[in-house]
Image (spheres, rainbow, N blue to C red):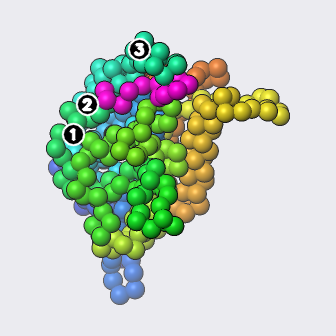
Amino acid sequence: MMGNATSMSKNLAQAIKRQGKWFRLLSCVVVVGGVGWVMSYRIVALDGGGIRGLVTLGWLERLSDRYPGWISIADVLAGTSTGGILSLALAAGISIGDLRDLYLKRGPVIFGDSLWDDIKDVGNWNGAEYSAEPLKGVLQDVFGDRTLGDLKQRVVVPVFDLDNGSADPQQRQWKPKIIHNFPGPDNDSDWPCWKAALYTSLAPTFFPAMDGYIDGGVFANSPGMIALGQTQDTRNTEKAPALNEIRLLALGTGRSLNRIEEANPDWGIRQWARPLLQLMFQADMDMADYQLKQFLRERYHRMDVVFPEGTRISMDAVGQMDELEAFSRSASLGAVQGWMAQHWL
């Protein structure tokens, strides 16, 4: 009976795929008393990284060429910073090609600086590197009046709230916030998509805070664990998936081989300012990767690329966009395709 059930499942899945459709209940198993279905609950988690989101876009496009429609069967799209923009846009039905064009054409506008701004901020010492207004304008153009409630898929976008505004002085503080559209009393379905995309992208020192929010990358630059936790939130009014049902694919934006070679650096604010931010982002990604491996085992896969020794590509490196696309094209997809064939499709 086991062989017949497995054969039936495979034949059904293949027939549906040939018609360009996707079926969520692909794995048939035998249980006591008969045949039952094991559901797959799929999560895509996209890292932060500014203009390095071009790397992520390249991988999304290549995987879509190989497996058309694979993103549309994801139950949850989670993203931080540039990954948040991509997750919200994909859930809104915006094509990967259009997003790539957006990054290439508008990236230099978003990460553009003026002489007057440099003078006013004394370089980068007395203010953020860039104005957030160009980014805000681009995101308003992209999303229009869409809200999170208009999206067809669940989204999870971490931001950091600098003042929760509590009426109780003993509770008023800064705190992480997870913007999401899971059904429940605390969801953010009425939030404009452009606002969620903006707030999660406001990396400290690069952009000023807006409306009291900054980049969620300060605590979750790799949002996989945040997404996993959100699926289990007891406030959700839909049934939480079991851990053995969850498949999670995390995509990075490329990483440099950063280190501090000085053994005993006696640094102050000036020396630590920029490296500390990068250190926090990287530490979070590494820890999220470790935790997801423990919780999900083989049902979790992460893809990222390490830039060659000596190569530094910052989140605002619009002069290196060709290089980013080259890294995206040259990275092998063998491991992720093998994982997807076994756990996603």
Relative to 83, is 102 on the left or the right?
left
Relative to 111, is 22 on the left or the right?
left
Q: Quadrant of residue 322?
A: top left
Mark 2: secondary structure: helix
- Residue at point 38%, 77% (across, down): 30
Mark 1: amino acid: Phe
Q: Residues within 10 Å of mark 1 (few under 14, many from 20)?
A: some
**Which residue is nearer to you in this view: 128 or 13?**
128
- Residue at point 17%, 49% (across, down): 19
Residue ID for mark 3: 116
Picture layout, residue 12 above or below residue 56: below
- Residue at point 32%, 53% (across, down): 155
Q: CA distance from mark 3 to mark 2?
A: 20 Å
* Membership of 128 in magenta stretch: yes
The disc label shown at residue 137, or none: 2
The disc label shown at residue 306, or none: none
Q: Give x and y (percent) for residue 194.
A: 27, 42
In front of the other: label 3 or label 2? 3
Q: CA distance from mark 1 to mark 3?
A: 30 Å
Q: CA distance from mark 2 to mark 1?
A: 10 Å
Q: Which residues are magenta?
A: 124-134
* Membership of 336 in magenta stretch: no
The disc label shown at residue 143, or none: 1
